[in-house]
Amino acid sequence: MCTSFKKALLDGEMDFSSDTSQTYKIALYTSSATLDASTTAYSVTNEVSGTGYSAGGNTLTVVAPTTSGTTAFLDFADTTWSTATITARGALIYQSGGSNPAVAVLDFGADKTSTAGDFQIQFPTADATNAIIRIA
């Protein structure tokens, strides 16, 4: 999770369940991008380009926040770029609109490529141990 996202949560600036005007997106980046916990917002710098990919990435479907024990968590539905020819090393989840604040950075560990095929992000199981966003 991005540090600025944690602060935004405490400031009440991010709402994943009741404010339907807030849209979340995921953008893909090349290995030249510098993405980490200090990332504060979506940027086009070193975003991937290619067939089947549009700047800004895909809109995510939020799976409503929930709790298990003392952990709160949320998930997103998997997302796919169909018939895409792209290479990505990582991704940024961000809130679309305003300053496009960052939520979380994903590092794929190596370049991932699709050639005229599906490029899919599969989010982990939505539970207290694995969900993409967990607060324990």
Image: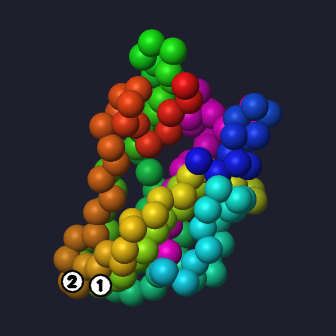
Q: Residue at x 60, y 67 (%)?
A: 35
- The mark nearer the N terminus, 2 or 1, is 1
Q: What segment is highlighted magenta in the picture?
A: 12-29
Judged left or right of residue 73, residue 77 is: left
Residue 112 image point, x, y percent: 32, 75
Give, as a three-letter code, the residue at label 2: Ala
Residue 20 x %, y %? 57, 36
Position above or below: 32 against 56: below
- Res. 9 image quadrant: top right
130, 87: nearer the viewer:
130
Q: Are marks 2 and 1 in contact (CB under 8 Å)?
A: yes
- Nearer the observer, 83 or 47: 47
**Residue position marked by numbered label 1 in the rendering:** 85
- Residue with the mark numbered 2: 116
Query: Left or right of 11: which side holds 82?
Result: left
Q: Residue at the location (48% across, 80% down)?
A: 30
Residue 17 at least partly seen: no
Residue located 73% across and 49% down the image: 4
Q: Could one spot residue 92 in this view of the protein? A: yes
Q: Amino acid at mark 1?
A: Thr
Q: CA–CA distance between discs 2 and 1?
A: 5 Å
Q: In terms of depth relative to the viewer, which is nearer, 123 or 77?
A: 123
Secondary structure under tag 1 reads strand
Q: Horizontally, is 88 left or right of 22 in the view?
A: left
> Of helix, strand and loop, which mostly describes the magenta segment?
loop
Q: Residue 65: within the magenta?
A: no
Question: Percent position (x, y) of residue 31?
Answer: 49, 81
